[in-house]
Image: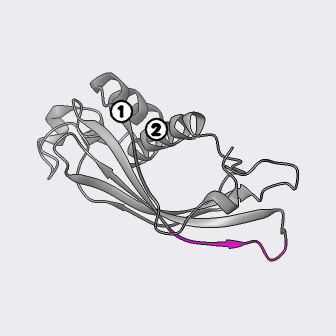
Amino acid sequence: MQYFEDISVGATASFGHYAVTREEVTAFAAKYDPQPFHLSDEAAAQTHFGRLSASGWHTCAMVMAMVVENLKANRQAGLGSPGIDMLKWLKPVYPGDALRCETEILEKRVSASRPEMGIYKSLMRVFNQDDVMVMTFVSNGLVQTRPKDAPAV
């Protein structure tokens, strides 16, 4: 189990693989972001996207799925997140793309009000199959500090 003390500023990780499908793009858009360029090629052809593209919010959801899978494989005493500081959608995500993530720990500190938890800030970069960065964000994570009876990693 990875605790706050095991997280190192500057540490990097690469993980994930998410195949973007047309069916998922249109289903997500129909329910959560029904803008025409997320629903049809014809409408998207009239925009700078040029063709059907995933909602940026869908891209966030796909990344979250990869983050959770990574956390399952690399158990962390995670306690959720108080949010993100910055989010940028840099390039469109299209059906047929395959996404992956790279993350870097930027800083960390023990919570002043809750010393049983720490807070760390990380930079996430999301790439497509051509290694083009499509999204980036800075997130804040909460993680438990190591209990006295927990073994060191």
In this figure, which residue is indicated by the disc labeled 1? 18
User: Can you say whether 75 is above or below 4 in the image?
Assistant: above
Q: Amino acid at mark 1?
A: Tyr
Cα distance in 3D space between marks 1 and 2? 7 Å
Determine whether label 1 and label 2 are within 8 Å by CB: yes
Residue furthest front in the image? 152
At 25% across and 55% down in the image, what residue appears? 133
Q: Residues within 10 Å of mark 1 (few under 14, many from 20)?
A: some
Query: Over which residues does the magenta segment extend?
Result: 106-113
Determine the secondary structure under disc 1: strand
User: Can you say whether 45 is above or below 11 in the image?
Assistant: above
Decide if residue 55 is in sight here. Answer: no
Q: Residues within 10 Å of mark 2 (few under 14, many from 20)?
A: some
Looking at the picture, tell me which residue is in the foreground, 103 or 74: 74
* Residue 26 in the image, given as x and y percentages of width and height: 34, 29
Determine the secondary structure under disc 2: helix
Residue 41 is a magenta residue? no
In this figure, which residue is indicated by the disc labeled 2? 66
At 43% across and 38% down in the image, what residue appears? 62
For the N terminus, give its image quadrant: top right
